[in-house]
Image (cartoon, rainbow, N blue to C red):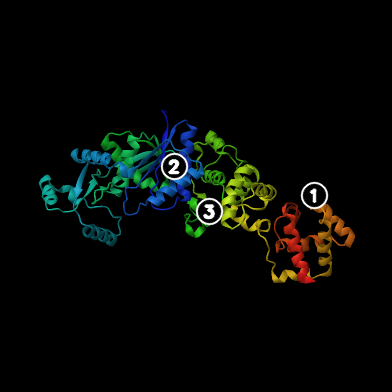
Amino acid sequence: MGKVKTRFAPSPTGYLHLGNARTAIFSYLFARHTGGDFVLRIEDTDRERSRKEYENMLIEDLKWLGIVWDEFYRQSERFDIYKEYVDKLLAEGYAYPCFCSPEELEKEREEAKKKGVPYRYSGKCRKLSPEEVEKLKNEGKSFTIRFKVPENKTIVFKDLIKGSIAINTDDFGDFIIVRSDGTPTYNFVVVVDDALMGITHVIRGEDHIPNTPKQILIYEALGFPVPKFAHLPVILGEDRSKLSKRHGAVSVRAYREEGYMPEALFNYLCLLGWSPPEEDREIFSKEELIEIFDLKDVNDSPAVFNREKLKWMNGVYIREVIPIDVLIDRAIPFLKKAGYDVSDRDYIKKVLSHTKDSFDTLSEMIERLKPFFVDEVQIEEELWSFLEDSKAQEVLTLFLQKIEGNKPESPEEVKKIAKEIQKTLKVKPPHVWKPLRIALTGELEGVGIDILIAILPKEKIEKRIKRVLEKIA
């Protein structure tokens, strides 16, 4: 096998879907695993649906995932190249102008529907003589260009994932390769681009299988070598239906905005349809994945997307994989957006170092770490009953006395003071920790109160406790 070259060719018509992101990752990994090249090609020939802002987001999201390409192309900048090959197909009799109006084609579709058969173009313009074609052009009649598909020919190709696939040309008939506005269509330009760019392996979703025989015919007509194809299984939601918005977030952008780690999303998407050699392991770095990834280990059956599994994996990355300084850099924009003061990096580092095991995403972090950053906490009405107990008042008062000289600077020192209070007031641990938690956080649950006290500035601790004591006095 010569040097491998793969590509990812998204259309800038929407956000980067998780399924497309997985395709990009598999194409990238296979190229890198084999020492080959990876191409990013923006397929923007559909002028009505393509948007520059979507292209920019696609590029940003791919970079965020850690995918690096060797070559970059934009199809809208290659129209002259496509015209050359359209002319070649027309000159050699592999394509012809079609003057059928949308109304005529719709009538054909309706007739096929009545007969209960799949629609395929009748091919009536295929029979036009050169003189008739010239006459219609001179009259200014609009036309498309169709590829002349041989009748009743079985196209067979070996898919690297699904095995041998055979499709008869009678299933689809003559198809359009140039629209009436002069723009080339997907099935045509993808062949020209893949051939001229030297793509050896086309890795894409299984929804492209029906396109493959059409593309093989164009490869053969133009005298281009046919690449190897690998069609990836579909990604399903947990209800076993195709992954869609009803299953929750389905775009890379949405997970970025929720505060997921790119390494975690990259890692998780790899496991959708691919079985690593080490079956008892799930956490892999990008470098490790490049080392072990192979298309032969991609499964033929659909993969199920489990949002909770991804969230769990993201938590593992936050707790165990991402360096603390990188985590800080990623957390600061979220903290800032929430209105928290981010001017003291050392303080943020101290907070995250002690609390990163208490949240799985950076959006969860915002609420979980609120007591560390706000000036005052809001205590729910029903929690005041816990604080109005006489013992709670004694605990809070004694705690203030204990920290009057020096505030405890470690969770261990906080626990030591708590034990002293228990002993002095002859109460059980919950009777110490609960009033402290409510007074300092306004909640019954959250990060360890010993951690909060150790990190929170002394003045904030005193202010919150005194506020409570004044209210219950």
Q: CA distance from mark 1 to mark 2?
A: 59 Å
Dot 3 or dot 1: first in sequence order is 3
In the figure, is residue 332 to the left or right of 231?
right
Tell me the amino acid under the disc marked 3: Glu
Judge by depth and name the residue closer to the eye, 432 or 139.
Answer: 432
Q: CA distance from mark 3 to mark 1?
A: 36 Å
| Place of residue 81 in the rendered image (x, y in percent of width and height, measured from the top left) | 27, 39
Element marked by disc 1? helix
Dividing the picture into quadrants, the one containing residue 165 is: top left
For the residue carrying disc 3, how many other residues have a C-alpha within 10 Å: few (<14), some (14-19), or many (20+)?
A: few
Dividing the picture into quadrants, the one containing residue 7 is: top left
Judge by depth and name the residue closer to the eye, 293 or 82.
Answer: 82
Q: Which residue is label 1 attached to?
A: 412
In the figure, is residue 26 to the left or right of 457?
left
For the residue carrying disc 1, how many other residues have a C-alpha within 10 Å: few (<14), some (14-19), or many (20+)?
A: few
Residue at x 58%, y 40% (from the top left corner): 284
In the figure, is residue 323 to the left or right of 397?
left
Element marked by disc 2? loop
Dot 1 or dot 2: first in sequence order is 2
Q: Which residue is label 2 attached to?
A: 162
User: For residue 257, which numbered disc appears in the image?
Assistant: 3
Tell me the amino acid under the disc marked 2: Lys
Judge by depth and name the residue closer to the eye, 189 or 459.
Answer: 459
| Place of residue 151 in the rendered image (x, y in percent of width and height, measured from the top left) | 25, 45
